[in-house]
Structures are given as structure tokens and as C-alpha cells.
Image (cartoon, rainbow, N blue to C red):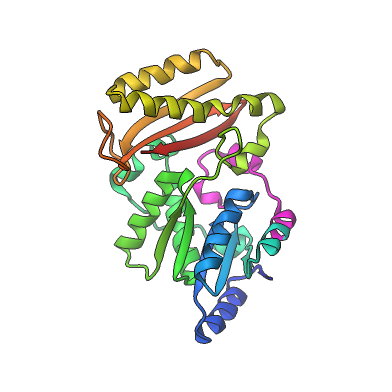
Amino acid sequence: MQIFNTIAETQNYLKAQQKAGKTIGFVPTMGALHTGHISLIESSKKENAITVCSIFVNPTQFNNPEDLKKYPRTLETDCEMLAKAGCDVVFAPSAEEMYPSLPKLKFDFGTLETVMEGKFRPGHFNGVGIVVSKLFNIVKPEKAYFGLKDLQQVAVIRQMVNDLSFDLEIIPCPTLREADGLAMSSRNTRLSAETRALAPHIYQLLTLAKEQLQSGASAAETQAFATDYFRNYPAFELEYLEIANFDTLEPVTQADTAGKTAICIAAFLGGVRLIDNIVF
């Protein structure tokens, strides 16, 4: 496995691979890898000759400096996991390498960034758009793989790819979960033993909310149900629970057609912000 820290050496190596006719699959990450990330690597390996994983904690997508400071950084362990999974290239740049100067460009994703994560994390998706577009231009993959746990991020990146005519395909991949239902996330490592035991209530609530909507409850009734649910678990601070169209993320008042309803949630637990969603 090749490990590169600079844009130049990464591009030189990958250009040579593409000249040799090899296809490139790409998995962008911020490190602190888990089984969910490795599943993306495995999906890429099935469809591409070369699989590249980037590890970069992107400062421009954090609106909370404390969150950036606390984000886990485990590069050595990450590389061991990637080597074992058969990843071919790791691109692990410094902030200075990625941003010799602060970017002045601003992305506007319209309504996609005014709801849910965009509403509560102003500037977040601008940072995501900038770093992902830079990474796409560096790696130049044919396919890029993203987990659906970050449903809104996938929608934003898909729109960016379409609007800017990037010559690549976005491959959304299912959310991987622990045995108790908790969505795999790098942030889970920040949970204490006590809060980790409570964390599966997020997925349990999503499952119950899905049942409510399928039985004919309105979005407003389902949101009220969620608020009541968390009153029984005061360790949680519910930030939002939104029922939206899967494609546009615009709010809906009732369950949409099959496969088009998304229930998205963000909640704080022991100071750790967790997100999840369920689509049906």
C-alpha cells in the first residue's frame, strides 16, 4: 500500500495508473476508521483496479472549533486497517498541503443546506463542497463511495457533481450498524461506557417513528412522539428529527412513496453529537 502526504506525489502515481488503463475508486474519509469505512473500501475494490482512501480532518467543515479539536486522529491505526483491507493508496495530507491559503470560493447548495445539518451547522456544507471538489480534482476517480449515514452530505455532493459536471459516479452505500443498532461512526469512540449503553435509543426511535408514519401518523405527530420518547431518556438532547423526501430532503407532511421517505435525526449524548437516518 502506498501512503502519500503531498498532492504532487499522489497525482503523479495515480496518473501513471490511469495511463496503464487502471480504473480508480475513491473513498474520502476524515480517519478514525471503523468497519463502515472498510465496507466502502471493499465496495470500491470489487469495481475498480485501484482503490484510494483519503484521510484528512477538514477544518473548513467544522463550525464548532471544539468539535474540530476533539475529533479523533488515529492515522497509524487507520493505515493498518486499510492495508489489511487491501487498499492501494492512502492520501493523508496536512491542512497546509490542502489549504496553502484559505479558500475564498463559496458554495450555495440552495435548500439542501438550509435544512437539518445545514440549519444547525452553518457553513458546514460549504466546507464539505470545497474539500471534496479538491479531492476529486486530485484523485480523479471514476467512482467515489459514500456512506448513507451522512444522507444530506451524499445529496449535497451529488448535486455538486451534477452542477459542475465532474466526470465520475457517486456510489451511495448502506449504513453499517453495531449489533445493537447504533450506526457506526468515528464519534462513537468519544462516548463513555454509560452513554454508549444509551446510544442505541437513537435507532430504536427511528424504527418506532417509521412505524408511526407507516400507520398513518403525520410528520408533526411523529415529531411530537420523538420529543416525548426522549423525555424518558434525559441524557439525550434532541436537536432535530425531520421527515423529508429522500431525493430533495424537503420536508413532507406524511410518508412518501416507497423508498422515498427519510427520517433524519441529530441528538447530543454526553456532549457528543450523533446523527442517523432511516429510509423507507
Q: Quadrant of residue 226?
A: top left
Q: Residue at x 65, y 29 (%)?
A: 196
* Quadrant in the picture for the N terminus: bottom right
Please indicate, yes or no, whether residue 13 appears anywhere in the rendered image.
Answer: yes
Q: Position of residue 77 (x, y in %)?
A: 73, 54
Magenta segment range? 57-79
47 relative to 157, above or below = below
Query: In which quadrant is the C terminus drawn?
Result: top left
Say above or below: 258 vs 198.
below
94 or 222, nearer to the observer = 222
- Is residue 63 covered in magenta? yes
Q: Main secondary structure of the magenta part?
A: helix
- Total of numbered circles in the picture? 0
x%, y% of residue 105?
40, 58
Q: Residue at x 43, y 18 (%)?
A: 227
Residue 99 at least partly seen: no
Q: Position of residue 122 (x, y in %)?
A: 42, 40
Front residue of 177 and 99: 177
Front-lying residue, 96 or 224: 224
Q: Give percent across and percent down for residue 219.
A: 30, 25
| Rendered residue at 65%/66% (across/down) | 86
Q: Is residue 246 above or below residue 180?
A: below
Residue 208 as seen in the image, left or right of residue 253: right
